Amino acid sequence: MGEIVRLQKYIAQSGAASRRHAEELIAEGRVKVNGKTVTEFGVKVEIGADSVEVDGKKLEPVLKKYYIMLNKPSGYVTTMSDEFGRPTVVELISGEIKARLFPVGRLDFDTEGLLLMTNDGDFSYKVTHPKFEKEKTYIAEVGGGLTISGLNRLRRGIKLEDFTTSPAAVEILDSKAGRYEIKITIHEGKNRQVRRMFEAIGTKVLSLRRIAIGEVELGNLPHGRWRHLTSHEINCLIR
């Protein structure tokens, strides 16, 4: 008898999606177990015995797990495909790793820097779910309008349209000709959050680069290149 797991975990283990995205696929009626569409989250399947399909494609649990760090360039979307034909981060690793890897969280189209990719849905869940509170650190170049009172608003937590941020760690690294280089650490990682935070205090982000997630740092990884995470880095991200 094979191991029995929840359906969304099976989908995550197959590398088809993160566990959270797997729940969306189930709710949308895109998952079949032994030929029958399933829309409930409580279903369990036996590895090696039950057949699971997503959008008509049969899934197989992945035995080898990959955990990589990519230095994402600007101009790439962090999705598996793009309806507008824009380049995706998957193209930067395709051909070198045969497994199907997906991005862990997202970076905006115009944002550069540290992006994790994996075929392990459990790993993705532990890095991205808000309850684990993984800090994300960015270097932002911002334009004029920056004030100390504005930075202090970021440090206290600032109200945006849909939520109030947790207090951010903010440090001015450099200033030149009305532009400022700011190091900022946030907790949530909502859509375009850093850009929206600076807009809320009256300044504009000109460029943005993520340099760390938790204790794991981008370091000197070249632009557009990737490397495998070390076992220490993996443990730092999931503990």
Image: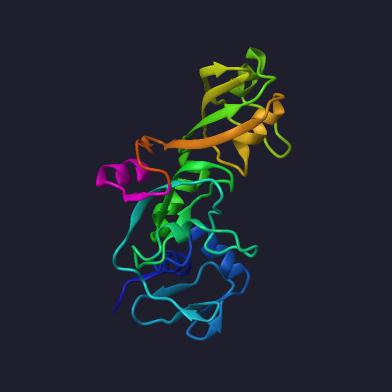
Residue stretch in magenta: 224-239
Residue nearer the viewer, 190 or 2: 190
User: How many discs appear?
Assistant: 0
Residue nearer the viewer, 20 or 230: 230
Q: Position of residue 205 (x, y in %)?
A: 63, 32
Quadrant for the C terminus in the image: top left
Q: Does residue 8 lie above or below 89 as drawn? A: below
Quadrant for the N terminus in the image: bottom left
Q: Position of residue 78 (x, y in %)?
A: 53, 54
Q: Is-magenta flag for residue 228?
A: yes
Q: Position of residue 30 (x, y in %)?
A: 58, 75
Q: Does residue 27 lie above or below 168 as drawn? A: below
Residue drawn at x 64%, y 65% is 83
Residue drawn at x 33%, y 40% is 236
Figure colour scheme: rainbow
As drawn, which residue projects farthest toward the bottom?
Answer: 35
